[in-house]
Amino acid sequence: MINFKELAKKYGTPLYLYDFNHIQDRFLELKEAFKGKKSLVCYAVKANSNLSIIKHLSTLEAGADCVSIGEVKRALLCGIPKYKIIFSGVGKRDDEISEALKEDILMINLESEGELDRVEAIAKQMQTKARISIRVNPNIDPKTHPYISTGLSHNKFGVDIEVAKRMYIRAKNSENLDPIGVHFHIGSQLTELEPIIESSQIVSDLVRSLKALKIDIKFFDIGGGIGIRYSHENTIDVKSYVDGIFSTLKGLDVTVVCEPGRFIVGNSGFFLTKVLYEKTNGDKRFVIVDGAMNDLIRPSLYKAHHDIKLLSDELNHSKADIVGPVCESGDFFAKNIDFPKTTHDDLIVVHSAGAYGSSMASNYNTRGKVAEVGVLNGEDFLIRKRDSFEDMIKNELECLG
Ligand SMILES: *Cc1c(COP(=O)(O)O)cnc(C)c1O
């Protein structure tokens, strides 16, 4: 059990805390579900890109799914072997592509014909052959929040099946491209299995038709997106997930790659914040805390729910908004929730803040990014220092014309 009060006192607030044992358990649970099957679990670095977390997963033999060359470098720095690193993303710069080729990672995941042109041209310049996969759009409704749904035609991600086929044929006939993978990722925080399996069926049919064209797909990348419980959501049983995927792959000899982010780190994380004041405007009650949207933007960005608990035995509840000090009405962690009466310095814990929390943090309002702490086997350790004022301004120049 993590002692929030003690750690808040030791490291100050606002603070991110991560249970490394939980991260490990989640990763191993997924590994176990794939046991005996050709598979590669690539952690989606963007969910939480702290070096210590990547490193911990690296020691458990995780691969990495990256969406920028910066994330690729993080993965390499943390000891993830290059042959377990995938570079995805809808817009890659030339320098990112050439660097990924230089690093010789497992594959670059293409999301448009334009990108295929660029990767081919750059590989040619470098006199190399780029291993690629193509992200296809199975056009399946993932039944999640529209902001985090990605597999529909009106999303910016991936290409339609017919376009993908054309791209595969071009790649096969190119001296500088080696089409080894197929990829789909229909959304995040998926709580139903059916859309994933349906997508897998569609994409596996594509792989079969490519086989007939003598294009041999070796990596079948099912993306990430496994949902977690923030409050009372249904969750996907990972064993059924894996079995369901493999049931669509009959007759194919492929390595299944999956790219979980939230599933691995989401529930491991806690955001600790302290009460500054309470106030009422009219009959509206606000609890103002020292953490804000620049630290944890999910409630503002996605109207996401996080369980929020006051660490005291106060029983005097009434409705309140939990808000931060940032100058935006969108700066809140919760609206209109039943919350006990608070006083200055009371500690509040925001649960399930391990994914898309610190990795989405900014310095908005010149607020420093907060400290981050890991806890493994009862021991706590700092994994990111709190920003100082100097950290925040160090790249700025005072040009007075
Ligand atoms: C964001 C993303 C993931 C991880 O999503 P989670 O919902 O955190 O599992 C995996 N693959 C791709 C391509 C992504 O964009």
Image: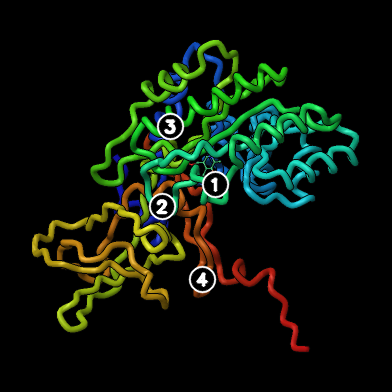
N-terminal label among 1 and 4 = 1
Amino acid on which the number 2 mark rests in the picture? Pro
Label 3: few (<14), some (14–19) or many (≥20) C-alpha neighbours in 10 Å? many
Q: Are marks 3 and 1 in contact (CB under 8 Å)?
A: no
Q: Position of residue 236 (x, y in %)?
A: 34, 31
152 left or right of 233 in image: right
N-terminal label among 1 and 2 = 1
**What is the C-alpha distance between the residues marked 1 and 2?**
19 Å
* Number of numbered discs on residues: 4
Amino acid on which the number 3 mark rests in the picture? Ile
Residue in the picture at 30% in, 53% down: 306
Helix, strand or loop for disc 2: helix
Amino acid on which the number 1 mark rests in the picture? Lys
Helix, strand or loop for disc 4: helix
**What is the C-alpha distance between the residues marked 1 and 4?**
20 Å
Per the image, the residue denoted by label 4 is 364
Helix, strand or loop for disc 3: helix
Per the image, the residue denoted by label 3 is 196
Per the image, the residue denoted by label 1 is 46
Q: Nearer the viewer, mark 1 or mark 2?
A: 2
Residue in the picture at 86% in, 32% down: 128
N-terminal label among 3 and 1 = 1
Per the image, the residue denoted by label 2 is 146
